Structure formats: C-alpha cells, structure tokens
Image (tube, rainbow, N blue to C red):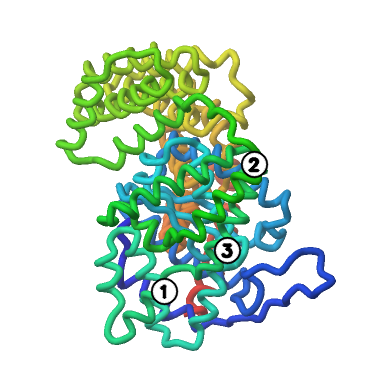
Amino acid sequence: MKHSVIAIILIAFSWLQGPVVQAQTVGAGGARLPTLGDGGEMSSAAERRLGDRIAREIYRDPDYLDDPVLVDYVQGIWQPLLAAARARGDLSSELQANFAWEIMLGRDRSVNAFALPGGYFGVHLGLLAVVGSPDELASVLGHELSHVTQRHISRLMARQGQQAPWLMGALILGALAASKSADAANALILGGQAASAQGQLNFSRDMEREADRIGYGIMTEAGFDARGFVGMFDKLQQASRLNDSGAYPYLRSHPLTTERIGDMQSRQSMAGPVMPGAAPSLAHAMMAGRARALSNPGVDALRGLLSEADSMGLSLSSTVTTRQAGALYAGVLAAVRLRDFGAAALHLDRLTALVSSDPAGGQLTHWLRVELNLAAGDWRSAQALLETRSAGEPGAGQMRRPELLLRGQVALQAGQEAAWPALTERLQLWVADHPRDAQVWQLLAGVYAAQRQTLRALRAEAESRVAQLDLAAALDRLKAAQDLLRQGPSGTASADHIEASIIDTRRRQLESALREQALER
C-alpha cells in the first residue's frame, strides 16, 4: 500500500511521546508461562489509539481494498484463528476488548503481510495470489496474530521510547514503506541513524520464533493442516534462494533463518507421520485468481489473464483442475474489466462446469455470474440468479456479506421501490451486528436516499466515515443533516424527529472524540 509520508510521520511525532506503562510480569506461581511480550510495554488503550491513527491513513490509501468476496474468504480463515487464540488463552479479554482485530486488504502485488499497533493487520493481494492453500494463508495470519497477542509490537515501541520522536516516526513509516519497496523504506530512514532504525524494522529472532511457535499452535487448534506452515516456509525459502528481487518483502520484515525452518520441521515431525494431502482447494484457487485480477488493473495485465484463460483445456487431474479453476476465474474478471462480456460469459460457463461438484466453488461462481450481469447492466438476470438461491437462504441477519451487497446493488440498479423496505431491514440488521462495516453503511445510505429519506441517508454516510475513523468527515455529514432539519418544513414526520435525536446524540459524541484527539496532539 502506498501511504502518506507526511501524515504517518506526524502521527508518530505527535503521539509517540505518550505514556509507556510498565506491565506486570507473571511470577513463578502464575497460571501461564511468561512470554516475550511481558515486560515494559505501552498500555493496550494507548497502542490502539496509535493503531487507529495509522489505520485511518490506510483507509484513505487508493490501494486499500474492501472486496466483499475476498474479505469473506479471508474472514473464513481469520475468525477460526481468533477463536482458537481465545480458547488457548493467548488472546486475553483485555486485548480482545481493546484491539480492532481487523484485516485490511491492499492491492499490492508483492507477497507481504504485516501487523500494526492496536490489532490491525495488512494483507497484500500478492500474498493471496501466491499461497497454495487455506492452510498456508492460516500459517501467515496465525504468525502475525501471535506478534500482537504476545505484545511484540508494544515492546518494540517501548524499546524506542527513549529515542527522538522523529526516529520512531521513521520506524513506523519505514515498516509500512518496506511492504512496497526496500529502497523506499531505506530512503525514508534519514541520516546517520539509518542503520539503527533499519535494524528495528524487524522483530527480534526470539520474537519470530515465539510467533512461529504460538502461531503453529493456533492454526492447528483452529483445524488447519500443520503442513501449511511448512509449505509456506518452503515457498519463502525458495524465494530467499532466488535473491529476493522485491516481490517478497515479507522476507525483509520476517527474515527466514535456518533455526526457524528447523524448528518448524521438528514440530511437524513430532506431530506424527505425514499423511497424504487433501485434494487441492478449488475455492482457494479461485480466490487466488480473484486476487491476481484485482491486483493487476493495467490493460496489458488483464489481457494476459484473459489469454491464460483462453489457453486452458479441461482435465480430470485434481492439480490441473485447480489451476484451471484459478485461471478461468481470473479470466472472467479480466474480461469483465475489459468490457468483453462475451468472453467473460464463455469462461464462466467453463468454470461453472469445472466446479459443479464443489459446493464452495459453486457459491463463488454464482456470485461471479451476478457480478458479470450487473457489470453488463442486466439487472434482471442478476436478480433472477439471486432469487434462485432464496429458498434455502438463512435468516435476514445471517446472509453472507457478498450476497447482501450484491442484492443492494441489484435493487439500486433496478430502481424497484417494492424491494427497498426488505433490503433496508436486512442492511439495518447487518450494521447492528457489524457497526464498523463502512461499505454496508454506504449502501444503506444509498438505499435511504433512493427512498428520499435524506436524514437517514446522511446519518448512514456519517456512520460509514466513522467506521473508517474519519471523524471530521462524519461530523460534517451530521451537521449537514441538522442544517437540513432547520431548513425543512414544519410538518416533519415523527420518524424524522427520532432521527434528529439520534443525529444530535452522535454529533455530541463525535465532537467529544475529536476534542480528545486534539488533546493527544
């Protein structure tokens, strides 16, 4: 992700002089073994505030991506990892309440993932395109999760607490820039302090080993195959032998040592005999194909993906079939972006036949066909496709996010007023359970606007901005709603009076939060 240099340096300048607290260490009679995260560290609330400031810049980055289908897939891996960390006692109740535990996707084609203060995690589409299975992705996410649960980030920050604020700013900025380019990271670490700051970009070897050990336990207890960890290590080791050209920045922030490789191989051997591997995942191959298509916006790259799909034959070999599924899925998306809807439909038919016996693959092709029809402006076909699955659909509050957003897009494109009340109810139920879902809040704003419920539309837009931590923009929308109330007719509907009360309360809350932010600066 490309990040604003000045903004993130100012974050570090203005905030990192805040309090660093001394955590209590666990005594010999404690209930758990001491971890490398114990010792001097920032408070969890302080770390979260810093993480929010950095996350706010990432949300503004044009490379930030909230793709419902990819997010749904990653969350299907991420949530079991969080549950396993809680069950093992690695994720304390304090951290669970105070941290965000949010994964943010970036369009970057480099192979990278990183943890940020406050429980934010970045994953590049390049990583999703390269990992060969959900288990390999779980190994990376489990490792990054462990860096946060063990307070490694907090310890690194506390260690730098005695240094100049600008150096700490360079550290955070450099760590983010390293995800894009090692040269960029080095250029941002200025003067004679460059070597010192560069050395702090990486976690210590002990921290890396601990994140491996705990991440391995988390992913296996979450139900993922331990071979995914070994497989990911093999990929990284091969990349390091090829003299990393910049496509694997993960190797710079998480250097792969013979100790780490040996330790993981030892854990794998202790787990028992190696059993035959499961059949390759068609759904994972398709999501890797989606990541490739969405991270390659250039026309030449899209044509290359379409050409690859054109060259794909059909085979009964599971390995070949998986590769075909990924290539065909990427080819469909590439054709849609090139506005070649005929080619997109042709490859989608081939893909549908290929994955017809796989339920997860069938769901993904179903959503993809709806996307294709919407892109072609054929909302009637898109609506018919969505209705074909309505019979076995779960309750309104349980609909999966990609389908919910697709239904919203269909309703708005069709302009069918009869569908809006039911859709509004579904969206309201969703944001009640997921108040930080900016995209659903924005869709709800569009549905309210279509129904001429302007006050509610403005408040939904404000909540969308709050979800992405842009409190000033949210406050502007609430003020606009109050201005509209003052200018409106005297016979305002009772529902608008209720909405006006909610808007007034939210405005006061945001003004208070902005005052607190100003005091921190």
> Of the residues shown, which amino acid type is indicated by label 1?
Ile
> Rounded to the nearest whole Å, what is the CA distance between mark 3 and mark 1?
23 Å
Name the residue: 25% across, 73% down: 187
**190 lies left or right of 36:** left
**229 lies left or right of 150:** left
> Rounded to the nearest whole Å, what is the CA distance between mark 2 and mark 1?
36 Å
Q: Earlier in the sequence, mark 2 or mark 3?
A: 2
Q: Position of residue 376 (x, y in %)?
A: 27, 22
**Which marked residue is nearer to the observer: mark 2 or mark 1?**
2
> Of the residues shown, which amino acid type is indicated by label 2?
Ala
Up the image or down, 414 lies above or below 270; here it is above
Name the residue: 59% across, 38% down: 224
Name the residue: 43% across, 58% down: 256
Q: Position of residue 74 (x, y in %)?
A: 49, 40
Q: Quadrant of the N terminus?
A: bottom left
Residue nearest the viewer, comparing 328 with 120? 328
Q: Which numbered tag is attached to residue 509?
A: 3
Whether residue 386 can be seen here: yes
> Rounded to the nearest whole Å, what is the CA distance between mark 2 and mark 3?
38 Å
Residue wearing tag 2: 222
**475 lies left or right of 195:** right
Query: Secondary structure beneath disc 1?
Result: helix
Residue wearing tag 1: 11
How many numbered dots are placed on residues in this image? Answer: 3
Query: Secondary structure beneath disc 3?
Result: helix
Query: Secondary structure beneath disc 2?
Result: loop
> Of the residues shown, which amino acid type is indicated by label 3?
Gln
Up the image or down, 142 lies above or below 374; here it is below
Up the image or down, 178 lies above or below 485; here it is below
Residue nearest the viewer, comparing 285 with 236? 236
Residue nearest the viewer, comparing 489 with 227? 227
Q: Residue furthest right?
A: 29
